Amino acid sequence: MTPHMSQSKGYIATHKRSTLAIATALAAGSALLATGLAGGATAAPAPAKSEKGASVSAAQAARVSMIKAAEKKTAAVAEELKLGSQEKLVVKDVIKDNKGTVHTRYERTFAGMPVLGGDLIVHKTEAGKTETTKATEKKIAVSTKALSAAKAPKDARKVVWAATGTPTLAFETVKTGKAKDGTPTKLHIVTDAESGKKLAQWDDIHTGTGETTYSGSVEIGSKEGSGGFELTDDSRGGHSTFTLDNGEGEGVLATDDDDKWGDGTPADKNTAAADAAYGAQVTWDYYKSVHGREGIKGDGQGATSRVHYGDNYVNAFWDDSCFCMTYGDGEGNEHPLTSIDVAAHEMSHGVTSATANLNYMGESGGLNEATSDIFGTAVEFSAENAEDKGDYLIGEEIDINGDGSPLRYMDEPSKDGSSLDYWSADAGNVDVHYSSGIANHFFYILSEGSGEKEIDGVTYNSPTKDGSKVEGIGRDKAEKIWFKALTEYMTSTTDYAGAREATVKAATDLYGADGAEVKGVEAAWTGVDVKG
């Protein structure tokens, strides 16, 4: 059937009656958060069927087949890696790149307990050569006596903490609450099982801010429901947009009588819903067209957007537990944070969680935040929206500072007054939203080079630590390098030195060891004082 098209003042909504392929059954019985097949993966000869009978893509069928094959070999791989008798591997994801190398990502358990920071990746070439990337090189060993003596407190679970220091028996507790600005919190606290000393803590809720720029007349996916039209996009995994009506909870699915969503102003509650849906749409399209990834988890399933959260809430956040992005309405409930780069930033936290799962603390936390800024920027450029052109400024239209200045600058992060331009030994002690400046700066220099430059009317001037001149390799190559490094080489504990190593490997895989791209990666990292 021909899609129904209707135009409002601010948006064009696309309504499709037919439900396209949604791989709803692929994750059945599995706790995996898995990536998709990037860079020319081997495809299955014909579409597969889910348990509900819906067709799934050839790429998804191939991915599931590789995961199942890897699951049958976990014991053999553990033996090859010389892991201890109490250690087991759990397959999280398998990616076969365009050169035929298979990258299998594993989580690890010890005596049935999760090993936090014990993840690893096995890289196997077509010729059979095998290499391994580990989050920790230290041996996982907890005494039988300690295991029997330790009793987890109420609401805590036994784990092995291996992300920092010597792997040790620990308790992990999750405390929920709210931050001062109204953001929900899910604070993980890890304590030594014997001494009670706090070993680490981090928040599961990943926040980020952006501008409320309405993207003009755009097409968004909706479908006809029992009482009108619903903001669900079946062509992108069933992504749905809900409204919380300035409250909390699960909200209700956004609906409209005539399929004309919003009028371009905050007065119409569906304007924010349309912006959020459009942001999710262009983010989905970016990951699929540029990286071959179908959906955040790479499983062809859409996420959820929730708008109108809280009262005067000036932020947005990603929550993995509900697989959703949530947006506040900003100051005075008149500036919803539902723009392209905000949507892409939040959804990219989900991509990170499903792949490297960078710990949201220390240097890995800075890399986690930077990844969302990097892909938020990449999506903004990719969308080619005339009302919100791509740039290397984060939150340039939200005016959160009251003077028209951006929230963050990728060409010289310290211009925001808090972010780091360059790496230092203290970087891991800085808030992750500010230590992210190091990787943001790297990405800008890698893409555009150092010094002065004007792009689409915006003037940039990016310095280097040692004053050296760096030539950029182009944003298209830079984002492919970062994505490959994230999905195939980074682990939960990757720090800035590890990010340099991962991106050099990714650039080598993509463009060759002696190419300008590898040299550009090395020069850009040196420019932000992350040396090899």
Image (spheres, helix red, strand yellow):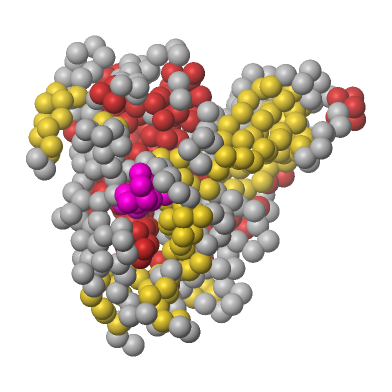
Residue 258: x and y in percent read: 33, 80
Within the magenta stretch, is there residue 333? Answer: yes
Which residue is more in the foreground, 130 or 511? 511
The residue nearer to you, when weighing 347 against 338, is 338
Q: Position of residue 99 (x, y in %)?
A: 39, 47
Whether residue 108 is situated above or below residue 380 in the rendered picture: above
The quarter of the rendered structure image containing the N terminus is bottom left
In percent of width and height, residue 310 lies at 48, 50
Q: Is residue 232 left or right of residue 264?
A: right
Relative to 83, say whether 94 is above or below. below
Q: Residue at x 56, y 68 (%)?
A: 24
Of residue 333 and residue 258, the one placed in the foreground of this image is: 333
**In this rendering, would 449 be left or right of 278?**
left
Rendering quarter of residue 201: top right
Residue 262 appearing in the image: yes
Main SS category, magenta section: loop
Residue drawn at the location 46% of the way across and 60% of the way down: 245
Q: Residue furthest bottom?
A: 1
- Residue at (48%, 38%) from the top-left corner? 181
Quarter holding residue 466 = top left
User: In this picture, which residue range is highlighted in magenta?
Assistant: 328-339
Point out the image quarter for the C terminus: top left
User: Could one spot residue 16 in this view of the protein?
Assistant: no
Expressed as whole percent of the image width and height from the top left, the position of residue 33 reads 56, 51
